[in-house]
Image: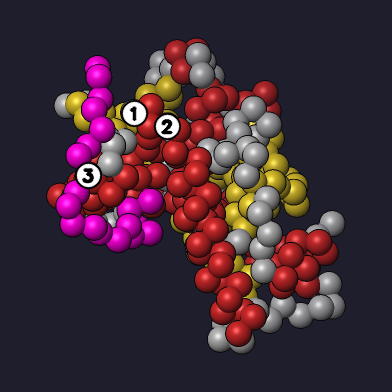
Amino acid sequence: MLLMPRPMLRRHCLMELVWLEDFEALAEYGSFVRAADARHITQPAFSRRIRSLENWIGVDLFIRTPQGATLTEAGRHILASAQDAASRLYRIRAEAQEVAGTAAKTLQFAATHSLSFTFFPRWIRSAEKGAPIEAVRLDSHSMATCEQMLVHGHVQFLLCHRHPDVPPRLPADQFVSKEIGRDILLPLAGGSTQFDSLPETLPYLAYTDESGLGRIVSHRLQGKEAFLHLKPLFSSHLAAVLMSMALENKGVAWLPKSLTEQEILDARLHRALDQSWDIPLEIHLTRPVAPLSPYAEAFWAGLQ
């Protein structure tokens, strides 16, 4: 398909920062409906903003088909630059506010839900090490949303589970991480659910695509669904929701040990499969390679 440059508009318009964020969302989701939902706006309004960006640049950035939207060559070429530009602009604002004293020295984290409830409170207390942290802002979301918040510069750090074979959806040359803990995904079921041997079908409580744990579990189970006779029964991006379903004896879910320790001790959850199906996890704190505020840089340097 030959894509022609757009004719330059007679009336000049100002490019809006949200257009870059919309562009990144559509590049990630490949669907106007899903991207608009992730951006919390209506699909027609989202489409108009994408068209406005294309008009401002002067070329088509997406090939539109009934199946969705894919990046043109021009779109692929500018994607990394667009991500970097948005992130830099937000960092400039945060640094200016900090230097001017109009913003508190705040550490800004995005964390996946399961780590927000369990790991983060203990870890941030230990990270102070006698040097009190002035202020902390924690945003708890799905992995997909947390990644976008970090890319866009809305937060300084991303706290999430990682697996060596399943890298995050972040430009590898723009972000760096430190391992700050360990966890493990256990195949668990409710205390009154019995799995003496593999049944004909194993009711499966699954993560959705936007879940980072879901990416890891999908990688581990790839090609093994038939062997386990998995029958997807329910899905959510929230490990806590899957845990509640497992507690009601609805099926098997791979759940973080950090989230389920008390339920296992109380025998409300038990192992549904042997240890060969456990999935070891690392807990990482990720930040941009580009400089952060002096306060955030000092915090990062102090981490062991």
Q: Is residue 192 above or below residue 99?
A: above
How far apart are labels 2 and 3 at the CA level? 21 Å
Q: Secondary structure at mark 2?
A: helix
Amino acid type of disc 2?
A: Arg
Amino acid type of disc 1?
A: Thr
Q: Which residues are magenta?
A: 1-20
Q: Check disc 3: other Cα within 10 Å, few if <14, some if 14-19, many if 20+.
A: few
| Front residue (pair 122, 63) | 63
Say which quadrant the C terminus sits in: bottom right
Residue at image location 56% in from the left, 67% down from the top: 92
Q: Main secondary structure of the magenta part?
A: loop
Q: Is residue 55 above or below residue 262?
A: above
Query: Which label number is shown at residue 72?
Result: 1
Q: Check disc 1: other Cα within 10 Å, few if <14, some if 14-19, many if 20+.
A: some
Query: Which label number is shown at residue 76?
Result: 2
Q: Secondary structure at mark 3?
A: loop
- Left or right of 219 on screen, residue 39: left
User: Residue 19: image x %, image y %?
Assistant: 33, 53
Q: Earlier in the sequence, mark 1 or mark 3?
A: 3
Q: Which residue is disc 3 drawn over?
A: 8
Asked whether disc 2 touches disc 3, contact meaning CB atoms under 8 Å apart, the reply is: no
Q: Earlier in the sequence, mark 2 or mark 3?
A: 3
Amino acid type of disc 3?
A: Met
| Front residue (pair 117, 211) | 211
User: Residue 95: image x %, image y %?
Assistant: 61, 72
